[in-house]
């Protein structure tokens, strides 16, 4: 299934549907796309998105409700900035549970 265009399309469709001000994990996104257990593949798709994508890639975080990029890296800071601009609140490095699907 992972080699078909429908696999990537299903994940991207679910990614596009994550509401403003909410986040979800790689695993949740995979499950919502009908691909339980494919969290790693979701991560690979996120890595391959074009730099100028309009998809809300920043709403995907790890299962511990944390940004997966190294703390302080440019990518980490960009993702956190985007999340905070949507009203996402953090306690330390964790996203508050009420803002997590």
Image: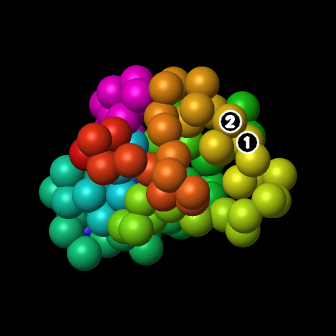
Residue 86, position as x, y percentages in the image: 51, 25
Q: Nearer the viewer, residue 2 or 84?
A: 84
Residue 25, given in percent of the width and then of the height, sits at 36, 58
Q: Is residue 45 left or right of residue 63?
A: right
Image point (62%, 59%), residue name: 47
Q: Give residue 46's position: percent from left, percent from top.
A: 55, 54
27 vs 74, nearest the viewer:
74
| Magenta highlight on residue 14 | yes
- Closer-to-camera residue (73/7): 73
Q: Assign the C terminus to one quadrant of the image.
A: top left
Colour theme: rainbow
Helix, strand or loop at mark 2? helix
As for residue 4 lying within the magenta part, the answer is no
- Quick check: 2 above or below 76? below
Q: Which residue is mark 1?
A: 78
Q: Which residues are magenta?
A: 11-22
Relative side of 59 to 28, left or right: right
Identify the residue under disc 2. 81
């Amino acid at each position: 299934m992972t080699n078909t265009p429908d696999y990537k399309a299903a994940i991207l469709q679910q990614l596009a549907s994550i509401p403003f001000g909410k986040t979800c994990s790689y695993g949740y996104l995979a499950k919502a796309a009908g691909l339980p257990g494919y969290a790693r593949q979701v991560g690979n798709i996120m890595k391959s998105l074009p730099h100028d994508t309009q998809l809300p890639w920043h709403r995907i975080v790890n299962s511990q409700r944390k940004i997966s990029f190294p703390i302080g890296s440019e990518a980490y800071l960009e993702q956190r900035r985007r999340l905070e601009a949507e009203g996402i609140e953090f306690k330390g490095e964790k996203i508050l549970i009420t803002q997590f699907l």
